[in-house]
């Protein structure tokens, strides 16, 4: 069976070799890289620009960005027919191929985030290692943790005031250097689509900019949503453990901190949403105004076949509704939760409409193709390219974040 035949339905005149080759994993790829970039930009707003209101979520979003980073490659690996060749992008990076440049950008960004995290948590590593060394009778787990945190210090045990100030300066420089790299990491995903001359829907110079703006929106929205979920877990733990451990923040303290952080972060989410929606609408208006040769079939896809996906789900549910939810004064946690979920839905549908919608019409301009998402896997291919494959990609970052939080606690005061 030809790749793509299992989930492609053809209509009218299409070429024999035309199928929906890029499936939900290619939708997940720009979606996940966008989350990485957006979460990092959110943390940089505090570290670089000194936005004090975002201090409490800056460390959270930085660790979460690092947890999302390894998953950025996962959709590509699952999509490849020969996954073992995927590592060649990292081992032989060069700029003569857009996708091969991924190795350079991804490695650079990874090193920047890892370095920034090390400077942010160096004091924690040193203090934890020293406290474990001071235990009179450490068990095997304590010895292992002591070894781990001692290695993480990289031999830098100085936590004097001058040394910590030097760490803060290093964090600021790394965060400043990381912003353009993070934007480039996701902008180049838009560049890949925008440079495909054979596809009328993708071929636009605005594509990288649209991808960057929507990436920041999705990253901030996911950080807010994850922060709310994490705080809800902390509240439940506070109820159970408060009596035995009075040093744990009370329910009222957690509620107050959560409401403040969510309200402040939502303002920046709203600002980036305005930029993202404006660019997307400008692109749509530009296409209609110029009305090049391919506009007739594009119009039938945008205004007829994908009308519900684009105008109802993406712009209506994913942009307009959350925009008003965040705009109404007196933002509550429940309203913020609904709003961020809808924002993520809107950004995901934007990716879906670009990737799947761009393959929905034949190169003959006389036929259409419809992508049927494989729900229940009947083979390894439908498992990777179907709903279960997408769920695996979506769940893995939270597992990594859970493990990272054990080593680099996101709620510990600096």
Image: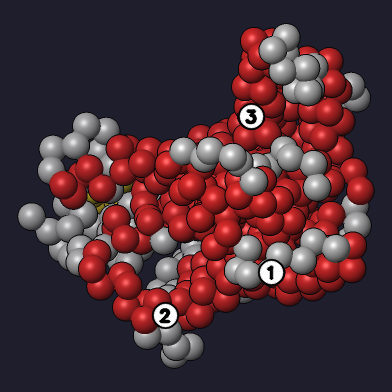
Q: Residues within 10 Å of mark 3 (few under 14, many from 20)?
A: few
**Residue labelled with disc 1:** 156
Instruction: Measure how far apart labels 2 and 1 are at the Cα level.
Output: 36 Å
Q: Quadrant of residue 358?
A: bottom left
In this view, the mark in front (2 or 1): 1
Residue contact between numbered discs 1 and 3, judged by CB atoms under 8 Å: no
**Residue 97 place in picture, x, y as percent:** 42, 84
**For this rendering, which residue is in front, 296 or 60?**
60
Query: In the image, is residue 318 above or below residue 174?
Result: above
Q: Residues within 10 Å of mark 1 (few under 14, many from 20)?
A: some
**Residue labelled with disc 2:** 100
Q: Is residue 14 left or right of residue 117?
A: left
Q: Residues within 10 Å of mark 2 (few under 14, many from 20)?
A: some
Q: Tell me the residue at 51%/55% (across/down).
A: 147
Question: Furthest residue to the left?
Answer: 1
**Residue 359 place in picture, x, y as percent:** 37, 58
Query: In the image, is residue 57 above or below residue 51?
Result: above
Q: Which mark is residue 235?
A: none
Q: Which mark is residue 230?
A: 3
Residue contact between numbered discs 2 and 1, judged by CB atoms under 8 Å: no
Instruction: Measure how far apart labels 1 and 3 are at the Cα level.
Output: 32 Å
Instruction: Measure how far apart labels 3 and 2 are at the Cα level.
Output: 37 Å
């Amino acid at each position: 069976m030809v790749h793509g035949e299992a989930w492609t339905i053809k209509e009218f005149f299409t070429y024999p070799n035309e199928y929906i080759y890029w499936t939900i994993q290619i939708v997940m790829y720009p979606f996940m890289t966008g989350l990485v970039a957006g979460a990092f930009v959110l943390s940089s707003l505090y570290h670089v620009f000194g936005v004090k209101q975002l201090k409490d979520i800056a460390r959270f979003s930085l660790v979460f960005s690092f947890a999302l980073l390894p998953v950025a490659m996962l959709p590509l690996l699952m999509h490849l027919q020969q996954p073992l060749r995927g590592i060649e992008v990292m081992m032989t990076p060069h700029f003569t191929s857009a996708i091969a440049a991924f190795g350079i950008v991804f490695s650079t960004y990874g090193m920047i985030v890892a370095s920034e995290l090390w400077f942010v948590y160096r004091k924690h590593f040193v203090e934890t290692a020293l406290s474990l060394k001071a235990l009179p009778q450490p068990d095997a787990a304590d010895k292992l943790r002591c070894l781990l945190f001692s290695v993480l210090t990289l031999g830098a045990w100085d936590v004097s005031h001058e040394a910590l100030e030097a760490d803060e300066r290093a964090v600021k420089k790394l965060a400043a250097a990381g912003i353009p790299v993070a934007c480039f990491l996701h902008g180049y995903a838009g560049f890949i689509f925008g440079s495909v001359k054979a596809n009328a829907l993708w071929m636009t110079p605005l594509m990288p900019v649209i991808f960057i703006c929507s990436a920041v929106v999705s990253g901030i929205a996911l950080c807010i949503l994850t922060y709310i979920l994490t705080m809800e877990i902390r509240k439940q733990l506070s109820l159970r453990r408060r009596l035995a451990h009075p040093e744990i923040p009370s329910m009222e303290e957690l509620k107050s901190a959560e409401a403040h952080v969510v309200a402040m972060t939502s303002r920046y989410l709203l600002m980036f949403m305005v930029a993202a929606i404006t660019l997307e609408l400008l692109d749509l208006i530009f296409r209609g105004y110029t009305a090049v040769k391919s506009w007739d079939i594009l119009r039938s896809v945008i205004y007829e076949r994908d009308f519900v996906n684009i105008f109802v789900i993406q712009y209506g549910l994913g942009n307009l509704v959350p925009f008003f939810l965040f705009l109404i004064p007196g933002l509550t946690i429940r309203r913020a939760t609904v709003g961020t979920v809808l924002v993520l839905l809107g950004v995901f549908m934007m990716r879906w409409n670009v990737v799947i919608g761009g393959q929905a019409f034949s190169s003959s301009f006389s036929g259409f193709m419809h992508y049927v998402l494989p729900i229940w896997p009947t083979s390894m291919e439908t498992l990777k390219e179907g709903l279960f494959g997408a769920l695996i990609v979506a769940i893995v970052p939270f597992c990594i974040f859970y493990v990272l939080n054990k080593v680099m606690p996101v709620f510990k005061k600096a």
